[in-house]
Amino acid sequence: MEPKPEISILFVEDIPEDAEMATRELRKAGLAFASLRVETRGDFLEALENFHPDLIISDYSMPEFDGMKALKLSLERDPSIPFIILTGSKNEETAVLCLKSGATDYVLKGSMSRLPFAAREALEHARAARESEASARELRESEHRYRTLADSGQALIWTSGVDKLLTWFNEPWLEFTGRGLDEERGNGWTRGVHPEDLERCVAAYESAFDRRQKFSMEYRLRRRDGAYRWIQDDGCPRYGSEGEFLGYIGHCLDITERVLDKERIRRSLEDKEALLRELFHRTRNNMQIIMAILAFEERAAHDERVGEALRRTSDRILSMSLVHEELYESLDLSRIDLKDYTEDLIGLLTSDDAFPRDRISVKCRADSITVPVDVAMPFGLVLHELLANAYRHAFPRGAVGEVAVDLRGSSEGGIELEVSDDGIGLPDAVEFGGRDGFGLQLIQDLVEEQMKGSLKLSSGHGLSCRVSFVPTKAVSGT
């Protein structure tokens, strides 16, 4: 019997085919999960109660029960469940509305290959939140253990009278500070408190004292060797047998290592989160805004050639944004696996509604090769241009054919990319990539100037475009 998948995904979708498409993309990316599809409010609430989803993926627009209603119900029941909205609209306002309403992310149906990335990111953030809560719970339990130790006499103990002045310190306190009892009594103990903490420390003590309340505070106290150590000081009022107020008793623990560990963890998390946020969110969002602007300009263009140029520019930006998604998938912020990137880019282009899947098939054979990001970016643009030109020009007037992509690495560190088709071939090199030859010129510039490689075209039964280059520090996989 196969083990039950650890992930449960709830699809809110009234079109089964769309849910199946999303399921295929997720499974193709290697995600193992159990899924359930609902399309009504009642079924959705029942699924929240009994299916216990780890992730919700919802269509934005449905006849009776839409994604925004589902999002509201999900946030009311359990705001920790990540929620991704699928939409067919490229409208930037729709995306902003979804995110402001509490959605974890949104994915365009025309870019369904981005769904696995969004799902993994959402699940990772949910996991991190759970771990953060577990860490907070562990910290609370740790603090409780510290208090237990203090009650058993393993702490620095002090007492005060009704006048707020401290009257007695136990031996561990005196051994810690290296001072005598008479030196510490009254307000003498304050001379050991770090100057930056003294005012806050005294104010907290006096405020709690006046209200006869327990207090807990942290401050730095000078040890006998002159080093300042972080102390957790817990105090509470003392009462006599008749209920009369006698003053306060407090116990202190050295929590320096805990404070330093927390600070190291905090800085590490902040650095990582800042880097990821900078790399993934800002870049992705900025590129999506640019693509949205280009899409608007494309719709407004009256010249067909201008509209086509704008759409191609948007596609090129999309191919560059895929590099950042691959960085996240590889968990390596400096290198890209060209095999994964090539397969994802092909999937991105073929998933577009404009791609004639009924006429053109695509085959891919790729070696696993990792390269620096500054190599992956021009490589992606070249691959995009070669594929786009094959799709657009190799099979005119409804012709049927095949496009083959072959990515090979050599033991010498060289890389060869070949994109070929069995279409009409290349009657005139100037026409390659468009009427003005911009596609060919762009490819040549990228290959020769940025990749320091060479481009070779051969046309007979179809067209073959071969790019050869030797990137710096390329690593061939097994």
Image (spheres, rainbow, N blue to C red):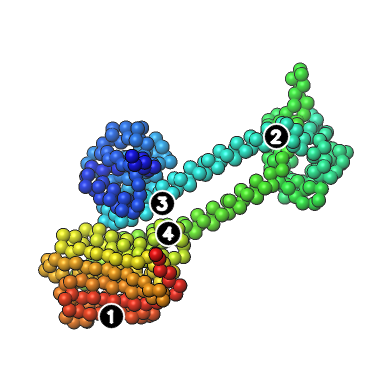
In whole angstroms, how far apart are the C-alphas of marks 3 and 2?
Answer: 42 Å
Residue sitting nearer the eye, 297 or 109: 109
- Name the residue rendered at 85%, 43% in the picture: 179
Q: Nearer the viewer, mark 3 or mark 2?
A: 2
- Name the residue rendered at 74%, 36% in the picture: 154
- Name the residue rendered at 80%, 43% in the picture: 176
In whole angstroms, how far apart are the C-alphas of marks 2 and 1?
Answer: 76 Å
In this view, 17 is above or below 205: below
Q: Residue furthest front?
A: 1
In this view, 356 is above or below 153: below
Residue topped by disc 1: 456
Q: In which quadrant will I find the C terminus? A: bottom left
Q: Earlier in the sequence, mark 4 or mark 1?
A: 4
- SS assignment at label 3: helix
Q: Type of residue at label 2?
A: Leu
In whole angstroms, how far apart are the C-alphas of marks 4 and 1?
Answer: 31 Å
Residue sitting nearer the eye, 342 or 75: 342
In whole angstroms, how far apart are the C-alphas of marks 4 and 3?
Answer: 12 Å
Left or right: where 424 falls relative to 263 = left
**Residue 149 image label:** 2
- Dots 4 and 3: beta carbons under 8 Å? no
Residue topped by disc 4: 330
Indicate the position of residue 61 as horizontal and vertical percent values.
Answer: 26, 45
Q: Residues within 10 Å of mark 4 (few under 14, many from 20)?
A: few
Q: Type of residue at label 3?
A: Glu
Q: Residues within 10 Å of mark 1 (few under 14, many from 20)?
A: few
Q: Earlier in the sequence, mark 2 or mark 1?
A: 2
Q: Type of residue at label 1?
A: Lys
- SS assignment at label 1: strand
**Residue 121 image label:** 3
In whole angstroms, how far apart are the C-alphas of marks 3 and 1?
Answer: 40 Å
